[in-house]
Amino acid sequence: MSSINEQPIPAARPVIGEDEIEAAVRVLRSGRVVQGPEVAAFEEGFSRLVDDRHCVAVNSGTSALHLLLLALGIGPGDEVIVPSFSFAASANAVRLVGADVVFADIEPGSFGLDPAAVEAAITPRTAAIMPVHLYGHPAAMDKLMPIAEKHGLAVVEDACQAHAAALNGTPVGAFGAGGTFSFYPTKNMHSLEGGMVSTADAELARTLRLLRNQGMEQRYANEIVGANMRMTDVSAAVGRVQLGKLEGWTEQRRANAAYLDAHITAPAVTTPPVADGARHIYHQYTVRIQGDRDAAMAKLTEAGVGNAVYYPTPIHRLKPYWEPDQKAGRTWDLPETEKAAAEVVSLPVHPSLTQGDLERIVTAVNDLGENL
């Protein structure tokens, strides 16, 4: 049990400091608050994280996924292969463009799409594969990209939790037709709210810019049907400040994770594996618990250690997906997905942790013992 003088350690701690506040106020005083110079500068700065690809800022990570699928021409009659072990936005974006979601199982280690399961799920209607770099660990892009090339499929990277993650030296967001990022406040960096699409294709980037701004490049000269998914300059200014701090924060997360890896010894707890060649940036430090997970989480909470499950219900079991599949007589065989959803718990790993916090986390986890 935590001491009465010890404050609980939060599972996440978004940062909004004086630098971010000053940047937002500066933009508000300028009068240029939407889709202006701050957005352009943020796009240019973020491009350096994705091998200098074109970057298009939008108002959320979900919008980034939605617009990328639209720009690629994916829609009714198409299928997109998606992991069920992810946040619902991954599949929602596919549904929003009118395409069908096909769920494939995950690898037991990385929580990313299993390449063998992806290949088995491909049909004549398959248009794209959507790997999710879950928790900040890159999916098996070295195996997924050849599968996509073999079958002529687009690869849409959901990198919303993986800013600056990489595999074999290539950053996530620089593998497929496009990558998508989220700047929600709990992400490794944020812009209050916002998203980004990265792509090597200049024409695709132009289409994305049109789609986010009512189909216009010049005012009242609409070229296509678009939407309003613009990022504000206030958000971009905050994002630029955070981008400048991202590398330091990332290294602190990785150092915190290394400490937890080295000191967690509870037999019922499996620390997160890292694939060969992967740069894990630990958006979440997600362990597996063998035994009574609810009891373990209650003990951690009692010890003052924040914890959470991402995600307790796989997407294919959520009402908007489960009910239509039931009516259609369609079922999904996803044993690794079901196992992960039943076992995972995320522990604090954010860069605000002190050495004392890390020691308290380790003690609380190791006190769980062998039998849960």
Image: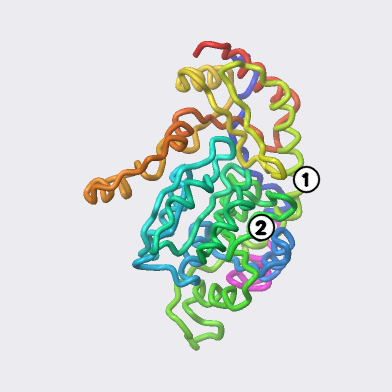
Task: Farthest residue to the left: give it.
Answer: 327
**Of the residues shown, which amino acid type is indicated by label 2?**
Gly
Q: Nearer the viewer, mark 1 or mark 2?
A: 1
Q: Are marks 1 and 2 in contact (CB under 8 Å)?
A: no
**Quarter in which the N terminus is drawn:** top right
- Residue nearer the viewer, 259 or 242: 259
Which stretch appears magenta?
A: 21-39
Q: Position of residue 161 (x, y in %)?
A: 59, 48
Task: Assign the magenta stretch its main secondary structure.
Answer: helix
Q: Is residue 27 above or below residue 157?
A: below
329 lies left or right of 281: left
Question: How far apart are the two marked residues, 1 and 2, measured between alpha carbons?
Answer: 15 Å
Q: Is residue 33 magenta?
A: yes
Q: Position of residue 48 (x, y in %)?
A: 74, 62
Q: Position of residue 78 (x, y in %)?
A: 39, 65
Q: Is residue 105 above or below residue 264?
A: below
- Residue nearer the viewer, 176 or 359: 176
70 lies left or right of 190: left
Q: In percent of the image, x 52 and y 66: which residue is there?
A: 152
**Of the residues shown, which amino acid type is indicated by label 1?**
Gly
Q: Is residue 179 magenta?
A: no
Q: Look at mark 1 in the image and give the residue it sits on.
A: 248
Rendered image quadrant of residue 363: top right
Q: Is residue 13 above or below residue 98?
A: above
- Residue nearer the viewer, 341 or 176: 176
| Label whose residue precedes the other's in the sequence (1 or 2) | 2
Q: Is residue 3 above or below residue 335?
A: above
Q: Position of residue 23 (x, y in %)?
A: 70, 59
Q: Look at mark 2 in the image and give the residue it sits on.
A: 239
